[in-house]
């Protein structure tokens, strides 16, 4: 088990490395198993799910190993995927989505192997963020292993080599 979230509708989503997603519906007493299928373009992009995020619009985002994100909003478990082709030529970029968090403005942050990708909810524009941080460390050469956003809008990022980094995005 890599991560667990509650979607606000009484369901618990469990991300499993090489096992897809299990969804426990406490109200109905059921478990659904979601996995990648070569025959279904609306399935997960792959089965190694590293992170999950439920955003303010009701979408569920599933971060994968090497296959970007899969996300859904309509409750029919039809996923769309984004492998971030716009970053394919960026040095060191891999579409490993290790962690995710949404800020109070709906901006989604995806922790990847060399920084963070920021997705604007209005424009859908994706930016590969590499910034100086409060600690003075550059975040361009580290893995974002965990993250959360506090009520003041500050993004806290746990990293593989540089400990904890905080960032405030002015919108």
Image: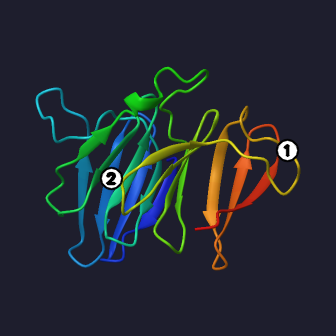
| Above or below, 132 relative to 171 | above
Cα–Cα span, label 2 and label 1? 37 Å
> Which x, y percent locates residue 62?
39, 49
Left or right, residue 170 beside residue 134? left
Left or right, residue 82 beside residue 154? left
Residues 124 and 59: in front is 124
Local secondary structure at mark 2: strand
Residue occupying the point 73% across, 31% down: 141
> Which x, y percent locates residue 32?
23, 55
| Above or below, 89 relative to 15 | above
Residue occupying the point 85% across, 44% down: 137
| Above or below, 84 relative to 56 | above
Q: Count the marks: how many?
A: 2
Q: Nearer the viewer, mark 2 or mark 1?
A: 1
In the picture of the structure, the residue carrying the numbered disc 2 is 22
Left or right, residue 140 beside residue 18? right
Residue occupying the point 25% across, 46% down: 34
Q: Badge 2: few (under 14), some or many (20 or more) residues near its Cα, within 10 Å? A: some
In the picture of the structure, the residue carrying the numbered disc 1 is 137
Which mark is first along the chain, 1 or 2? 2
């Amino acid at each position: 088990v890599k991560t667990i979230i509650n979607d606000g509708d009484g369901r618990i989503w469990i991300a499993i490395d090489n096992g897809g997603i299990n969804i426990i519906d406490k109200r109905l007493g059921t478990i659904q198993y979601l996995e990648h299928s070569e025959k279904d373009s609306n399935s997960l992009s792959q089965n190694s799910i590293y992170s999950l995020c439920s955003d303010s619009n009701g979408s569920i985002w599933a971060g994968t190993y090497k296959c970007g994100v899969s996300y859904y909003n309509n409750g029919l478990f039809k996923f769309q995927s984004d492998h971030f082709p716009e970053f394919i030529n960026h040095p060191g970029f891999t579409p490993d989505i290790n962690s995710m968090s949404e800020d109070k403005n709906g901006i989604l942050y995806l922790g990847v192997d060399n920084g963070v990708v920021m997705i604007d909810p209005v424009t859908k524009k994706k930016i590969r963020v590499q910034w100086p941080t409060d600690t003075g460390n550059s975040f361009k050469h580290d893995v974002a292993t965990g993250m959360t956003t506090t009520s003041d809008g500050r993004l806290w990022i746990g990293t593989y080599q540089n400990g904890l980094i905080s960032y405030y995005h002015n919108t």
